[in-house]
Image: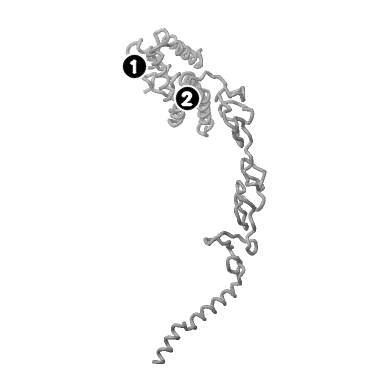
């Protein structure tokens, strides 16, 4: 049932006004997150509830101003009420992120938040980058509803702002480990990192660079001394009859260990390919027509003639033990 219709059915006017305040608060602050109405405001005192409700009902007040006021009230809250507020907003943000970006990303954000291994800016950058990826994946169906989708995108960003401030404890600062002074206003990711740096806070090395003694230096070509040219760490113009991303293989028609030295040409006709067989002997892979042998150096006709002669000789020659047996039989 529509929320406004549900509120209209409440019999008492005071209860209807209260429900309307709660409903608008839910729509502006939590959007897709479901909460019991009383729980949402339980950590606020009566004056704070009225103040925030009046701001929400005022069409001249932007959502961002409402968020700032909520954050101000949150900071003023102390003791058990503060703990309760933190718990409610934390749960709300976790559910909101899960609804918008998926449970897997929500768990990733939560794990980083608890690990304390990265800064709040880093987590906020991850969150906003994920959200930006979602925004950029708009398809034709979304383009047909451009106005509606733009409004949805704005609401999501505004809702995420309170999560960044309270859930992630991120104050909007820009910290880039001394390698930049500028952050993207939407994603909070550092821009134009210097000294070959990259990452949300310039904490890692850019592509094709590696960290050595806290300095990002260009990775040297690992081409087994067969080339000094690389493109994206892939060797170019391999020499000495080698191929491969690191010039680690012998080219067709050559054999040897390219990582240990040069590759030698196969001793095969017409620059044929070769390999080391099971007996550790170099053997040509494909002999030309009319030749056989491990080096393709035997005429197949001669080989066949010799093979036939050997077979005939074996079939017509009587073994010595048979001759001896015949002589003994005749003597008897």
Q: Would you name the residue on which mark 2 appears?
A: 116
Given residues 214 and 326, the one toward you in this image is 326
**Residue 282 % position (x, y):** 58, 61
Quadrant of the image occupied by residue 190: top right
The image shows a total of numbered marks equal to: 2
Badge 2 density bin: few <14, some 14–19, many ≥20, Cα 10 Å = few
Given residues 219 and 45, the one toward you in this image is 219
Residue at the image position 43 percent from the left and 30 percent from the top: 103
Residue at the image position 62 percent from the left and 38 percent from the top: 219
Looking at this rendering, what residue extends furthest in the top direction?
Answer: 47
- Mark toward the viewer: 2 or 1: 2
**Residue 47 % position (x, y):** 41, 7
On the rendered image, what quadrant is the C terminus found in? bottom left
On the rendered image, what quadrant is the N terminus found in? top left
Looking at this rendering, what residue extends furthest in the bottom direction?
Answer: 331
Q: Would you name the residue on which mark 1 appears?
A: 9
Dot 1: element: loop
Instruction: Say whether disc 2 or disc 1 marks the residue closer to the N-terminus.
Output: 1
Dot 2: element: loop
Name above or below for residue 316 compared with residue 222.
below
Residue at the image position 54 percent from the left and 76 percent from the top: 307
Name above or below for residue 189 compared with residue 316.
above
Name above or below for residue 219 compared with residue 294.
above
Quadrant of the image occupied by residue 175: top right
């Amino acid at each position: 049932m529509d929320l406004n219709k549900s509120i209209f059915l409440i019999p008492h006017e005071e209860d209807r006004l209260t429900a309307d305040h709660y409903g608008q608060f839910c729509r502006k602050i939590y959007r897709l997150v479901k909460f019991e109405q009383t729980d949402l405001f339980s950590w606020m005192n009566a004056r704070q509830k009225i103040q925030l409700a009046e701001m929400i009902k005022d069409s001249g007040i932007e959502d961002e101003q409402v968020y700032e006021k909520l954050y101000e009230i949150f900071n003023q809250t102390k003791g058990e009420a503060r703990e309760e507020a933190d718990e409610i907003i934390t749960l709300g943000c976790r559910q909101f992120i899960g609804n918008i970006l998926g449970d897997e990303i929500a768990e990733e954000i939560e794990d980083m938040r608890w690990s304390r291994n990265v800064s709040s800016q880093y987590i906020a950058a991850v969150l906003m980058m994920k959200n930006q990826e979602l925004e950029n994946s708009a398809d034709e169906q979304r383009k047909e509803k451009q106005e509606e989708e733009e409004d949805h995108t704005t609401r999501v960003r505004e809702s995420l702002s309170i999560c960044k401030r309270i859930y992630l404890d991120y104050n909007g600062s820009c910290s880039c480990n001394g390698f930049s002074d500028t952050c993207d206003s939407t994603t909070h990711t550092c821009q134009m990192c210097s000294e070959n740096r990259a990452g949300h806070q310039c904490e890692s090395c850019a592509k094709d660079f590696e960290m050595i003694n806290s300095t990002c230096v260009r990775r040297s070509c690992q081409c087994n001394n067969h080339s000094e040219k690389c493109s994206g760490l892939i060797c170019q113009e391999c020499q000495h009859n080698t191929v491969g991303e690191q010039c680690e293989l012998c080219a067709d028609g050559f054999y040897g260990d390219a990582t240990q030295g040069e590759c030698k040409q196969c001793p095969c006709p017409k620059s044929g390919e070769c390999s080391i067989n099971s007996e550790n002997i170099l053997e040509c892979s494909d002999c030309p027509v009319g030749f056989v042998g491990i080096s393709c150096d035997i005429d197949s006709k001669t080989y066949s003639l010799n093979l036939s002669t050997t077979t005939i000789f074996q079939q017509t020659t009587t073994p010595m033990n048979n001759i001896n047996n015949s002589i003994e039989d005749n003597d008897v």
